[in-house]
């Protein structure tokens, strides 16, 4: 066996350093990530960027929890870590010189931080390791990609044509032809897991926003001998959708429905039909009793009549889709629509990071 583990875009400190999200992360590491590494005898881990969420500073409570659930356990189990610098890990936007992973991991001698393009041996293979490409290292990055003897490339790339979130492809970034000389390319940065040809976006380990709803998250095992890439799914979910329709479900079914799964998670309740207000109020009371983190009730948002397909319901809760449709509807303007969509997306993501969990 010649397997290594790969994880990316952990974003410790996301959602305004929410303790609830840290608990959610820890559950993944305790119940899924480390048990799988130990069962498979994994001794090498590659981290493909964006280990921390904030570029400018670190919350000390977040750092303590991150060390306890991740860094210290890797060290204790003797797992060698090669960690790329991602764009969220860098203080400046034009250089990777000042980065959080290098500054915050000095106590761990098993961590090799890679902030410059380089090719390193992993097991019996050479792997081209590419941190975030910025103004300072662009020429070095292109030279490394063109001259390396490695046929495996791993990085934190922005490649045009791949989905940043499900259904939302990037229209900017590197052209995929830059990577055609490699047998397989794996990247962090975009949180939606996808692949096309030799390029694989691995996705992040857990749900962070509603854009991640019902979009599988996890990490990967990679066989250096066969190039087989195995996806290990994270079974824990932070965002849940509940459809309420008392014309389909009986009173007994609604009253006895197990709602315990909605404890300390985000819930969107889509009300299709509410013919019995008393029954609905009791259901809401039971839902709040299990202590969800947040409940959003979608009622009369769209024409939820008989025969409406599931994708119509999804439209009511996909903010990015709503934003894109609004921008597409703006026809009497000379503004570059693609750039406007990117600006709106960035503002949306920033707003999510600023809101209290």
Image (tube, grey):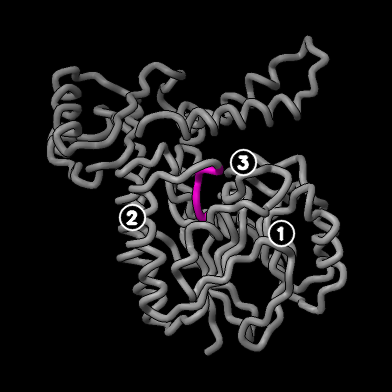
Quarter where residue 182 is shown: bottom right
Q: Residue 52: within the magenta?
A: yes
Drawn side of residue 227 relative to residue 333, left or right? left
Q: Position of residue 52 (x, y in %)?
A: 50, 51
Disc with the residue nearer the chain's start (3 vs 2): 2
Q: Where are the magenta residues, as a range? A: 51-55
Q: Residue 293: within the magenta?
A: no
Q: Which residue is mark 1?
A: 196
- In the structure shown, which secondary structural element does the residue marked by tag 2 occupy? helix
Q: Position of residue 121 (x, y in %)?
A: 67, 82
Q: What is the CA distance from the residue labelled 3 to the residue labelled 2?
A: 33 Å
Q: Residue at x 20, y 42 (%)?
A: 259
Drawn side of residue 96 relative to residue 54, left or right? right
- In the structure shown, which secondary structural element does the residue marked by tag 1 occupy? strand
Q: What is the CA distance from the residue labelled 2 to the residue labelled 1?
A: 36 Å
Q: Position of residue 271 (x, y in %)?
A: 33, 25
Mark 2 neighbour density, 10 Å: few (under 14) some (14–19) many (20 or more) = some
Q: Residue at x 57, y 71 (%)?
A: 112
Q: Residue at x 54, y 53 (%)?
A: 100
Q: Position of residue 1 (x, y in %)?
A: 52, 90
Q: Residue at x 82, y 74 (%)?
A: 148
Q: Which residue is mark 3?
A: 167
């Amino acid at each position: 066996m010649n397997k290594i583990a790969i994880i990316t875009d952990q974003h410790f400190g996301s959602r305004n350093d929410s303790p609830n999200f840290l608990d959610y992360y820890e559950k993944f590491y305790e119940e899924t990530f480390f048990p799988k590494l130990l069962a498979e005898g994994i001794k090498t881990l590659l981290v493909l960027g964006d280990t921390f969420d904030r570029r400018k500073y670190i919350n000390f409570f977040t750092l303590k929890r991150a060390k306890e659930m991740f860094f210290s356990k890797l060290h204790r189990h003797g797992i060698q870590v090669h960690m790329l610098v991602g764009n969220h890990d860098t203080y400046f936007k034009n250089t990777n010189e000042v980065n959080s992973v290098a500054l915050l991991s000095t106590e761990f001698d098993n961590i090799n931080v890679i902030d410059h393009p380089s090719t390193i041996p992993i097991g019996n293979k050479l792997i081209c390791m590419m941190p975030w490409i910025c103004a300072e290292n662009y020429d070095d990055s292109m030279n490394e990609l063109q001259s390396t003897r490695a046929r495996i490339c791993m990085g934190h790339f922005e490649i045009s044509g791949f989905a940043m979130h499900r259904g939302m492809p990037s229209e900017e970034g590197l052209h995929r032809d830059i990577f055609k000389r490699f047998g397989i390319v794996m990247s962090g940065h975009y949180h939606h897991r996808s692949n096309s040809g030799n390029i694989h976006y691995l996705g992040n380990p857990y749900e962070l926003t509603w854009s991640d709803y019902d979009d599988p998250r996890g990490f990967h095992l990679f066989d250096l001998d066969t190039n087989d890439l195995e996806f290990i799914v994270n079974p824990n979910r932070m965002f849940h959708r509940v459809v309420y329709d008392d014309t389909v479900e009986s009173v007994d079914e609604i009253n006895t429905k197990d709602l315990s799964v909605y404890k300390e998670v985000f819930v969107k309740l889509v009300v299709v039909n509410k013919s019995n207000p008393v029954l609905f109020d009791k259901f809401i009371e039971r839902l709040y009793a299990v202590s969800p983190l947040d409940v959003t009730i979608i009622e009369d948002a769209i024409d939820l009549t008989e025969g409406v397909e599931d994708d119509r319901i999804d439209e009511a809760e996909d903010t990015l889709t709503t934003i894109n449709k609004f921008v597409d509807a703006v026809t009497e303007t000379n503004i570059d629509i693609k750039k406007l969509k990117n600006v709106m997306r960035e503002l949306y993501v920033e707003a999510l990071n600023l809101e209290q969990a």
